[in-house]
Image (cartoon, helix red, strand yellow):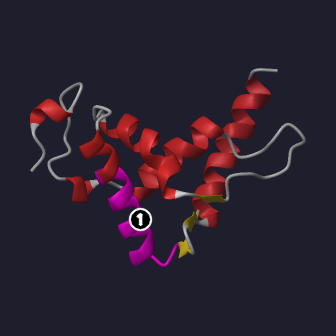
Amino acid sequence: MINKSMFFTESNLKDYRDMSLDAILREYLLCKGTFDSDGKPVHKIVAPNMLIDSGLFVYGLKSNATNKAAVKYYCEREAQRRNLMSGNVINIPNDLWDECNKKNMDFCKRNL
């Protein structure tokens, strides 16, 4: 169980184990982008510590040592379980990356 004082607002997260790696990866890709200024694909792999801020944001968790460690741990754990880890990085599933890339491209086209 997570103490309610760990959240900024009311949250439906009851246990750190209930975090969704896909939701965190999706937030990361939509925030950081899927292509660089030359249009080349980026962020197809990501270090678990880079996902901490996205995990805190998705679940409305306060930025403290406990929450940061939990987000990193459960992202690594789920990535290991799904065989997405390669060394110390997580390989983002192609279908998830493609979904976010499409959204990012659509957003950029709308705002030109």
| In the rendered image, the vertical position of residue 62 relative to residue 84, given as above or below | above
Residue drawn at 43 percent across, 75 percent down: 80
Q: Is residue 91 or residue 64 the one in the foreground?
A: 64
How far from the left and from the top, in percent, is residue 101?
Answer: 69, 47
Q: Is residue 25 or residue 107 the one in the foreground?
A: 25
**Which residue reaches farthest top?**
112
Residue 106 lies in what quarter of the image? Answer: top right
Instruction: Estimate how packed mark 1 is, as few (under 14), some (14 to 19) or many (20 or more) residues with alpha carbons within 10 Å.
Output: many
Residue drawn at 64 percent across, 65 percent down: 94
Of helix, strand and loop, which mostly describes the magenta segment?
A: helix
Residue under label 1, please give it: 76
**Which residue reaches farthest right?**
38
Q: How many marks?
A: 1
How far from the left and from the top, in percent, is residue 40?
Answer: 85, 50
Compared across the picture, whether 50 is left or right of 112 comes to left
| Range drawn in magenta | 70-84
How far from the left and from the top, in percent, is residue 3?
Answer: 9, 39
User: Was residue 30 drawn as part of the magenta stretch in this picture?
Assistant: no
Q: Secondary structure at mark 1?
A: helix
Quarter placement of the C terminus? top right
Query: Type of residue at label 1?
Result: Glu
Q: Is residue 79 or residue 12 the one in the foreground?
A: 79
Residue drawn at 43 percent across, 45 percent down: 52
User: Was residue 71 drawn as part of the magenta stretch in this picture?
Assistant: yes
Compared across the picture, whether 74 is left or right of 22 comes to left
